[in-house]
Image: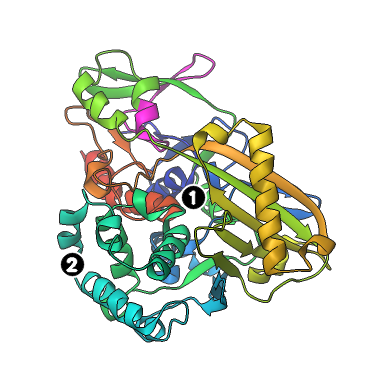
Amino acid sequence: MHDDVIIIGAGIGGLSIGALLTKEGHSVRILEKSSHLGGRTACMKFKNHILDNGFHIMPFYKKSSIFSIFKLLGIESRLKLAKVDKIMFHSETGFHKYPKGIRDLLSLSMIPIKSRIALLRVLLPMAFTSIKKTEEWDDLSLTEITKKLDPETNAFFDAVCMLAFADTPVHISLGEFARTIIRANPFKGGTSEFAYPDEGGYDSISKILFQYIQENNGQVELNSSVKKIVIENSAVKGIISGDGTFISSECVVVSFPAYMAINQLFEKNVISQKFVNKINQLNKRTAVIEVHFALKSQLDSRQVVFPVGTHYTTKGIFFISNITPSVSPLGEHLIIAGTPVDPMIIGNAEKTQKIVNEMKNEINQIYPDFNSSLLWERPMAWDLVESVVKEPGLVWKSKMPHQIPGIKGLFFVGDSTVSYGIGTDSAAHSSILCMPKIQSYLRT
């Protein structure tokens, strides 16, 4: 096979599979419709601060799928990471240490001792079960085990879910939550550590992968859209680009949400409607309001603070310049605060501003110097594609398969496809799982 492997999308999934393929000597051409790398992990410069598109974090640190890919490529030394380990809860009774293990749970000051024991009874069986066993819990909500717990313990689960899933327990599959606990268990080779790029901007991960692909003679073309994937006799023949040009290839990899791709990139009847209907169930959306704040003084030496309790609108306060000062100019400090919201709020400027004001008031209650230190704020509100789909019944093996049965040369990667975890780690894990399938096909 002499044609390039065409990869559609230069997000984490597309860049990961592109880098893995170039490592094995395959000719790769990545087409990205936007003007930037990284997909949803794109960053921008604003008033000399590096602003992420939302708050991103690398879970499980050097045990993560992203770091595993960097090790496979032999470029892990290029990814300079800052640990995110100064994490606290904040409740009406003050600050409480975020637990990193069993010992910390026993001393978790946020909840009474009896509740700590009840919490251990819930978490310990999860931590020592098998990934296979957790698949039996994929149809259950996390609330199946939390609904009988006291409010303080439920507040703990709220905070953990915000850090691990950026969502609330009612939307989280019990199976996916259990897999997260297993991957954080050091007795099973896991870790509860988190990390963020030391140079600032989560898109630095994408930039390193892009550099590696170029060094190995791969191509990444920005502002290059794809209209159609051409299928003839149940096999890929190439793609039609945005300007109508036909590009020949017998291997095409789709790396943006699969339910979008199967409705946009194929002629009718190429894929059975039954299969399309099944994949369309993955089309879920998440509404979020996040606000970047630049400050003239450092409010806290901690890196992440989770306000816990139903009276808080703010679900997370992330002190980005405490993680790495590289994100801000000298003498200034950057934080981002966020909360999930009803999708109906997005687009309503008045309601959005009301929530922003509530968040500012709450932060000022926790940190009385906040208002006087504030230099500027930049709110963001969006109703975005939730291609992770971590809710009950739609996780792990229920997601888009890496191949559509009966179509040769067509592959799917990214966090909407079969993989575990969320976000960048899910997208990277998907590429690891799909790579052997693509290699097997290319060898034939």
Q: Residues within 10 Å of mark 1 (few under 14, many from 20)?
A: some
Q: Residues within 10 Å of mark 2 (few under 14, many from 20)?
A: some
> Which residue has dot 1 on it?
216
Of residues 339 and 204, the one nearer the viewer is 339
2 vs 1, front mark: 2
Q: Is residue 188 magenta?
A: no
Relative side of 202 to 192, left or right: right
Q: Amino acid at mark 2?
A: Ser
Relative side of 297 to 166, left or right: right
Q: Is residue 248 magenta?
A: yes
- Quadrant holding the C terminus: top left
Q: What colour scheme was applied to this rendering of the protein? A: rainbow
Please tell me whether mark 1 sits on a helix, a strand or a loop. Answer: loop
- The x and y percentages for residue 173 are 29, 52
Residue 239 can be seen, yes or no: yes
- The x and y percentages for residue 276 are 26, 25
Q: Amino acid at mark 1?
A: Asn
* Magenta residues, start to end: 240-261
Q: Please name the residue shown 32% across and 32% down the image.
A: 251
180 in relation to 20, above or below: below
